[in-house]
Image (spheres, coloured by chain):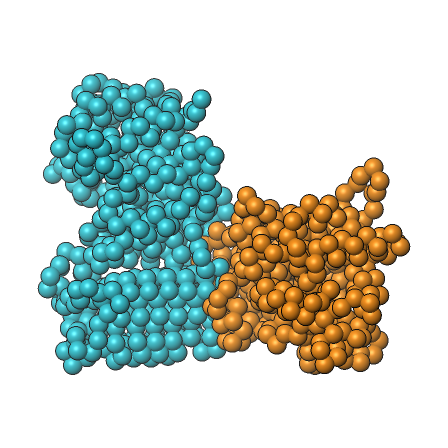
Amino acid sequence: MIRKEMIAMLLAGGQGSRLGVLTSKVAKPAVAFGGKYRIIDFPLSNCINSGVDTVGVLTQYQPLRLNTHIGIGIPWDLDRNIGGVTVLPPYEKIENSSWYRGTADAIYQNIDYMDSFNPEYILILSGDHIYKMDYEVMLDFHKQNGAEVTLAAMPVPLEEAKRFGILITDENRKIVDFEEKPENPRSNLASMGIYIFNWKTLKEALLAKADQPGLDFGKHIIPYCHQKEAPLYAYEYNGYWKDVGTLHSYWEANMELIDLVPDFNLYEEYWKIYTRSQIIQPQYLGPDSVVEKSIIGEGTTILGQVYNSVIGCGVTIGEGTVVRDSIIMNETTIGKGCEIYKGILAENVNIEDEVKLGIGDEVENETDPHIYNHGLVTIGEKSVVPKGTVVGKNSVIFGVTTAADYDNGNLASGKTLIKAGGEA
Amino acid sequence: MRAIGIILAGGNNYRMKELSQRRAVAAMPIAGSYRSIDFALSNMSNSHIQKVAVFTQYNARSLNEHLSSSKWWDFGRKQGGLFVFTPIVTMESSTWYRGTADAIYQNLEFLKNSHEPYVVIASGDAVYKMDYNKVLEYHIEKKADITVVCKEIGAESEVTRFGTLRMNEESRIEEFEEKPIVAKSNTVSCGIYVIRRRQLIELIEKCAEEGRFDFVKDVLIRFKDIKRIYGYKIKDYWRNIASVEDYFATNMDFLKPAIREYFFKEYPSIYSKADDLPPAKYNAGSHVKNSLVSSGSIVNGTVEDSVIFRNTFIGNNCYIKNSIILNDVYIGDNTRIENCIVESGDTIRANSQHIGEGAIKIVIEKNDRYII
């Protein structure tokens, strides 16, 4: 009989619309991070490093890149005879066929998958956080307390607590109450969206609440379990954890990696982060290159100057070009004599010679000021920016643009240039 | 599948000096991210040869570790696969491989149990890209018994450390000398052969009966007048690394844009074992010019005209010039290294100096490494 003590269900179906054009063609968990990784590499690596070798990945929004990346799980050692990684998209049924309508609904629709492993515990993860966590320690905590549900939680500054789901516990970390985004928080323990359930408890709750529209863990399943007086515990986590939900927090989290000794250290020997990398060559730094305070991925060629930046794999940066405070993702090409300040350039972008990005005053973005802010310039994947273009701050470009798309070779600060049918 | 592959990776070579104390030549790190044998293995895989045997005996630990999984070169298939053969003790024999022909003889069952009509034999100590199918087609067209891949080399390497050969106008090999004292030709054998499987079994069995062990001396040279042995001349990049000078120069070749384009960008790719190291990191104060740097490395100092392998730490205010720093090296602050090859796993103390004068210096320093 097949039996696994704990299996993980990784929610990777979300769009992550606050990342703007970065997620117009890929799901958020497949967005590049830290030079060579993708966001989903962090929870997947945590799984295998914690001894969880069975992971169901729930996909829905733009799954192509994610599917290609995960494959059969070889990079994470998740290619197993029994278990391993399985991609779980929504599927048609005899009746009630539907998309995944909420986090818990996605899990509900895959009860058969979980049942097939006869698990005792289910670990629920989300695919959009950057952190290292030993889920085995959390499971020990869960067992020691005889909990039916354990929520991972971290202390946050009280003034920020109103952005999170807040847990109120007794001295034994037993949860007595919780509040969703409270005005006046009674505690600073924020739920991280990481749960361990006894499978029996979870299954019972999912079946009971199946008809709830938009079935969600935070809003429905956890309150249901609490109401049934199942013992709920909060597992306190004090390490690095970052929700890269907005462009600015995404940019910040990348920039933190280049500190002399970063809070989130990728160079530790015993908790490796794995990823699929097609490119394995060394990087080449040319005779006139200058690189300081940066991390750079494999196979990249740098002939210009790079300061304070995170550069992916297979990137080319031309002679005389200056890149500062920027994120450049895989396979992007930047021509000669360019200047790039606070840019986020997605994969396979082509910046032609003498382009300047991030020049001028801060002007609020005209279409989506809540997405494109903090002076960042965002370029979507496979975009082309023609020679000599000057682009302002808080702006966004997506698609194969030509000189005709610009006002005299300029895109002023705060402008949005999204070309329909942007694929070349 | 028309051919199986054999990679001869047994050897040590005194010309590698201290570098081969640690590993077989085939396991020598190349160009930042590869090991020498990756080139032969990738060529096999890219030529759709699915069944490959690697013969090895000299200090194979490093090589075995590298070959512990065959998936990197896409050999983990139901048909074929990657086989690593070290000498074994049986009721009949308990000897080491006494030569290349003997290595094949001791594993003759591998050849007998295959069904593919041809065998491609390559060595694990050369850096090149090759579609062996082209050699195979040539071999069939010439109705050859054995085809030897060869190349004219210039002044960059010592001709006398290779087998040199001379061909007639039909490309049939007329003269073949192994490591001649005075070379009569600058066309050298690349150590890559194509031969029919049954023919190989026959020749190797004949050698064994007569107590002969070397493929070049006892097969190629001995049979050259009665067997049709042809040369297949290549013009592409090919370089043997089995001397300190050639090893150093081969690595330095990768600083040239044309060579990087050829090996790193053009189809097909060279594969290697993935190490899952983080991106290379450059801290404030780093100055890197005309150099290759591999993943997992952290640079704080100055590096010029050098090749830095994986997982290397270079301290503050260091000056590294015209050198090769192998994997997992720690270099303390204020260190000066010029014209050196620094052995992998080394820990170089702060404030030290290593300068190769006149020749490349091999640095082996096993100091305690303190956690910073």
Residue nearer the viewer, B50 or A56: B50
| Extreme-right residue of the structure | B210
Residue nearer the viewer, A117 or B207: B207
Q: In the image, is A81 to the left or to the right of A10?
A: right
Question: Exactly how many numbered labels are in the figure?
Answer: 0
List x then y, in percent, for residue B2: 61, 56
The residue drawn where x is 28% and y is 32% is A110
Q: In the image, is B28 to the left or to the right of A64?
A: right
Residue nearer the viewer, B38 or A197: B38
Q: Is residue A173 visible?
A: no
List x then y, in percent, for residue A125: 31, 37
Q: Quadrant of residue B152?
A: bottom right
**Which chain: cyan?**
A
The residue drawn where x is 18% and y is 37% is A98
Q: Quadrant of the C terminus of chain A?
A: bottom left
A216 vs A275: above or below: above
Q: Quadrant of the N terminus of chain A?
A: top left
The residue drawn where x is 60% and y is 73% is B237
List x then y, in percent, for residue A170: 25, 24
Q: In the image, is B238 to the left or to the right of B160?
A: left
**Which chain: orange?**
B
Q: Is residue B156 visible?
A: yes
